[in-house]
Image: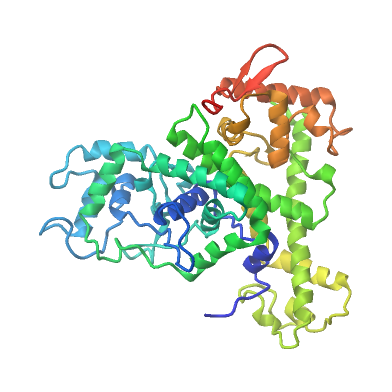
Amino acid sequence: MAPKRRLAPGQVAQVLFGLDPDRDERAPQLCAETLLTLAQNGYRAPAAGAPIQSPKRQRFALRSLALATNFLGGRDGRAGEDNMTPQLYGDLLAKGSEVRNSANLTLAQNALQGLVDPDTQRGQPGAWLLRPFHESLLWYDARKASPSRADWTVRKVYMRGSGITLARLLLDPGDPESAALGARAVEAIKEALTGPSPLAEISERLESALPTDATYTSPPDVEEDEKEAWERGRDKLLQPLATSICRHAEGVMCQGGASGPAKLWQLRTILALDLAVHALRVAWETTSTPDEDRFLLLSFGRGPRAQDRVRQRSEESYRRARIRLNEATISTLARRMRELVGEKTVVWDEEFEKRSRLVENRADSVSHQLTQLTADSPDEEFLRLARSSVENANYGRAEDGFRVLLESVGLIAGTRYRYLTATPDLLAALVGALSSRMPMPSNEFFAAIRQEWGLVINQESASSTSLRGQVDGAGLERNARRAEQLMSEAGLALSLSDRTTVVGERAQRWGK
C-alpha cells in the first residue's frame, strides 16, 4: 500500500474534522451508506476484533426493475430457469415485462419508480437511490467500468465513507448516555426498515432468481478504506458529533405521530445537518471565532431582497461560515507543514497529491519553498504557503461538502445571492429531533434550535449574537412570525392566538 500523503486534502480534513466531508456526498448518499452499514452488520457493532461487513449491497435485479436499466448486462450463468440468462433477466425487468410465474411487474415498477429520490438523479443510473423506506430497497453506488461495457460494479461514486463513520457513532458512541440513546435510535431504525412490506417481498423474489455464488450477488469483501472509516468513529474529535447524532436520531426515530418512512426521511435530513454543523463548529473553534459570531441566520422573508435586512444578514452569515471553514483548513495545513519540517527525511513532493500544482519543478513551487524552511521559521511563512496551497489545489472539499450538505437538506435558497432558510421537511426534522421535549411554545423551539444547531430565527435568539444592532428587532420578529406560519401550514405547529404558537404536538412521545 502506498504511503499516505500527509498534506493531501483528505488527510488534512481528517486531522481537522475527524473525517473527510466530500462535495459529492449529499444527504441521500450519507443516509443510505449509514443505513446500509447498520443493516449489513445486523444493527450492532461487530464483536471486538471482528471486521465490519461492507455496506456495498448490489441488488442488481431490483435496480433493473426500479430504474428501468439493465444492471445485469454482460453477466453469464442462469437466472431461475434453464434458458434464462442474467442478462436477459435484467433486460426483461428493465422493460417491466413479465418473467416466469410473475404478474403485475409493470405495476411494481411504477411503484418503485415513485420511490426514486429525485436528489440522486444525476449522472449514471447506478448512482440513483430510492428514498429510505425499507431495508430490502437499499443499495450502494454502482458504475460501469467504461461506457462501452455492459456490466456494472458497486464502487464509490457519491458514497465516500462518512456514512460508515456515522453508523459507528450510533452503534458505539463512546459515552454511556449517548450509547443508550444510540441503542434506542438503532432499534427504532431496525423496526422501521424491516417491517412487513409488499415491495420487500418483490425485492427478495427478484434477487432469489440469481445465482448466490456470483460476484454480482455475493457480498463484496470489506475494503481497507471502509475499515478506516469505521475506525474513525473512535476519534475523540468526533465525540461531540456522536453525542448530537445519538440524541437527534433517537428524537426523530422515537417520536410519536409519524410513520416509519416519515421518520427515516427526517433521519436523512438530520444526519446531514449534524455533520455539516459539526464541521462548522470545528472551524469556529479552530479559528477562535467569537461566541457572538457563531450562528447561522435563517430568513423567511418574501419581499424584495434590497428591502429585506434579515435576508441580507442571512447571506452574510452563510458567507462567513464558508470563510471560517476555509481559514480552518489553511490553519491546519500550516500546522501540519510545521510538524513535518521537524522530520529531517521528509520528501515534500511525496506529501502532496501528484496531480496538484504544488509539486511542479520550479523554484516558486510550494514543495520547493518548504525545503527552505526550518523549525525556527516564522508562522507567517507556513501560513503563506498553506494559503497558496489552498488557492491552487483541491483543499476546498470540506467547504464544498458543507455547502452541498446544507443544499441537500433545504437550508440554502437563492441563486446569485444565496441565503439560509428552512423548508417544511427540514423544520419537520428539527421538530422530530427535539421530540423528547415536545410540545413547546415557539419561542422555546427557536431557543432550542439555536442551542442545538446554531440556527437563529427570532429576536430573542439573536440578542446574544453580533446581529444586535445590525437588524432591528421588528424585522426579526416578522421573520419569526413567518416561520411560525410555515410550520402551522405544514402541520408542525398550532397557533393558539396572535401571540402564542405551540410547536410539535404531533411529535410528542406517547405516555411521556
**Which of these two is toward me, 393 or 230?**
230
**Which of these two is toward me, 345 or 118?**
345
Position of 472 with respect to 507 (left or right) is right
Residue displayed at 73% across by 25% down: 443
Q: In which quadrant is the C terminus drawn? A: top right
Position of 199 with respect to 143 (left or right) is left
Seen from this angle, which residue lies furthest top?
497
Using the image, determine if residue 296 lies above or below residue 285. above
Residue displayed at 24% across by 38% down: 106
Instruction: Count how many numbered circles sit on residues in the image.
Output: 0
Residue displayed at 52% across by 25% down: 511
Residue 33 x/y as whole percent: 47, 53
Classify residue 216 by image quadrant: bottom left
Residue 330 x/y as whole percent: 76, 64
Using the image, determine if residue 103 lies above or below residue 231. above
- Residue 101 shows up from this direction: yes
* Colouring rule applied to residues: rainbow
Using the image, determine if residue 11 lies above or below residue 458. below
Residue 417 x/y as whole percent: 71, 40
Residue 395 x/y as whole percent: 68, 64
Seen from this angle, which residue lies furthest left?
82
Residue displayed at 61% across by 47% down: 177
**Which of these two is toward me, 51 or 383?**
51
- Residue 407 shows up from this direction: no
